[in-house]
Amino acid sequence: MSQQHKRDGFSRRQLIKGMGAASLLPLIGGVAPFAIGGQHAGRVVVVGGGFGGATAAKYLKRANPAIEVILVEPAETFYTCPFSNLYLGGLRDMRSIAHGYDELTDRYGVRVIHAMAEDVDTDSREVILSTGRHLDYDRLVLSPGIDIRWNALEGYDEDAADKAPHAWKAGPQTELLRSQLQDMEDGGTFVMVAPDNPFRCPPGPYERASMVAHYLSQHKPRSKVLILDAKDNFSKQGLFTAGWEQLYGDRIEWVGLSNDGRVTRVDAGRLEVETEFGTVHKADVLNVIPPQKAGWIAERAGVTDDSGWVPVKPDTFESRQVENVYVVGDATVAAPMPKSGFCANAQAKVVAAAIAASLESRPAPEAYWTNTCYSLIGPEYGISVAGVYRVQEGAIAEVSGGLSPADAPAETRALEAEYAVGWYNAICQDTWGTST
Amino acid sequence: MRSPRPARHDALRRRLLRSLVATLTGIGLFGLTLPALADGPWQRLEATQAVLGGATPSTRGLVLDLPHVSEDGSAVALTVGFDGELEENDYIERIDLFAVDNPSPEIATFHFTPMNGKPEVSTRVRLNETQDVIAIATSHQGERFATAREVRITVSGCLMRNGNDQPEPLSSPRVSVPSSFSVGEPEEIRTLINHPMETGLREGPDGETLPRHIIERFTVSVNGETAFEAELHQSVSANPYLRFHLAPENSGEALFEWFDDSGESARHEVELSVG
């Protein structure tokens, strides 16, 4: 077998070293059936090192350290979308939203390969990397996040994103948007184009508008924020609207779908956008959050449907279309669960448990998930929405949940802003083992 | 390194099974495509039976496009159109839309003329819960076509909202037409108007049921001749949006009018340039 297939050699020495590191830990996840003598409990390849992928890798090892886990992620440093709006608002630096993979390798014995997964052969069960390596798998976890649907919005292609950044994947795009904001003249207009559902992080555009307004109120007091939206309703709308009025007066203007808010053409060179009924808006800084789809490798693996997203079996998040492939996070159709980092983390734990069970031919444990989503309207003004989900009648259903109260005192909003930081530190600790 | 796994054999067996299944499916489909399949949810709804008038619809040619899953049942984007075969000189005269499990299943009826050029409409609809949406098309000579799509409605956890401004009825009529037409070539027309489309089923802040208040009818005429009409019901979303086609033969004036059930109306005129 080994001469026929370009197996990625993972020596037993490395495996044992990894296991040794893991065994020094306080006992995690109970006593795992670790088979000595070269047999192992199966190999899982995880593609993508964000909230979903890093959590899946870690929790697979926690479920059973004998499972060989390989994480494929091109970047050595991962920047989170959560709190990247706080960087735009000047509340944080990029380092504070940067995370690495040391805990996964050193503490859990996950093998991390920094390469791009370029293709998947689901018949021979192989992932093909940009380095030319082929990785066999018994189970595959895809956590590919989103990709931009270039040109789905006329005029918005990869070149346009250099002038009118989307900043919907944290990193250089976020830094570009921040520097444009800093270079903008006082009195300029920050125009944001917001997409129709479904898209990554439903409250994200509105938190971003808040953080930009905060920055402007401090540094460019004559400047405005204009949101052109392809929807009539958005996440936590009442709370955002009330917070904007309270903190920023009329600095933020929101134009919804029914008032001709849907942008149908972008001219990034001129920093202009045109709406469906022909209104042209001129921007000084233009942030286009475009239509999205599941990350590209999901298409290669054949798990996406004609919507561009990935349908999954709700109990396990295994693909409905390809067996032995599990998909987590923003790429999936998991509604009513939103496309959030917290959901990706929760889904990854369900996937880890389901895979560990399936490798031992046990049934998967019953799944449930939680999500909390904090948004900052100002540095001391936080709001949130929370939900608990279970499988009911073959579909994911929200069984409990709620929003921050509408007319809460300032202390409540200030406490929620603190809780947001606590949440961020906890979820990053859980996912990458790092917090700031 | 590792002991050989039976994975290869599994993979081979899977491949064989898959091709066998594909072959069987192919035979099955072939068998089914011979007669136009008449079985569908339209057989179980009084309102759709009334439109069909006892006729057995063909299921070919009528295309209904809706998302599989919608996170917001208050405005689900829908496109319906016909691209099938018709007798010479026949054309699609009407398309009816139904939401099987809404409190009242009728969504809208669209009346086409040859001046539309292309029988296709997009709008946004309200869906109370996960259900089938049905479209029935009727041709000028009485041929019937039917199709249905299931839409799953979820309310996304992050999409919960509180507080909604009510739009001023019949305000801000908007029409978008192309700058010029080629003779007989259908081009896209888009219209939007503000209106609450109050269903008559909802309670106001005082606990009293708000009376029904909707736009019932929308008409388009070109040089005084009716080109397109829509009858709307309460399952059309607030601020009705309609996208359809016109293929005018001559330049002239297009008149767009919206009529609501309180007797009020709004109008918008646009010059069409054909050349």
Image (tube, coloured by chain):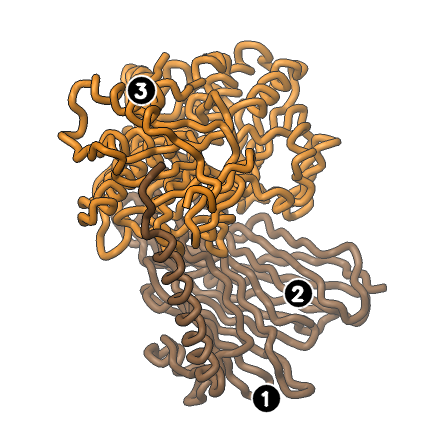
Chain colours: A orange, B brown
**x, y percentage for residue B203?**
29, 51
Residue A77 location in percent, x, y? 47, 20
Q: Are marks 3 and 2 in contact (CB under 8 Å)?
A: no
In what element is the residue under mark 2? strand
Seen from the viewer's position, the closer of residues A58 and A245 is: A58
Rendering quarter of residue B129: bottom left
Tell me how far mark 3 sits from mark 1, CA to CA. 69 Å
Of B267 and A193, the residue lying toward us: A193
Q: Quadrant of residue B180?
A: bottom right
Secondary element at tag 3: helix
How packed mark 2 is, by other alpha carbons closer than 10 Å (few <14, some 14-19, many 20 or more), is many
Chain letter of disc 3 in the image: A
Residue A281 sits in quarter: top right
- Neighbor class of circle 1 (other Cα within 10 Å; few <14, some 14-19, many 20+) is few
Amino acid at pointer 3: Gln
Picture quarter with the C terminus of chain A: top left
Q: Which residue is mark 2?
A: B245
Q: Disc 1 designates what residue? A: B141
Residue lying at 44% horizontally and 68% vertically, measured from the top left: B19
Please tell me which residue is depicted at 71% across the width and 56% down the height of the picture. B177
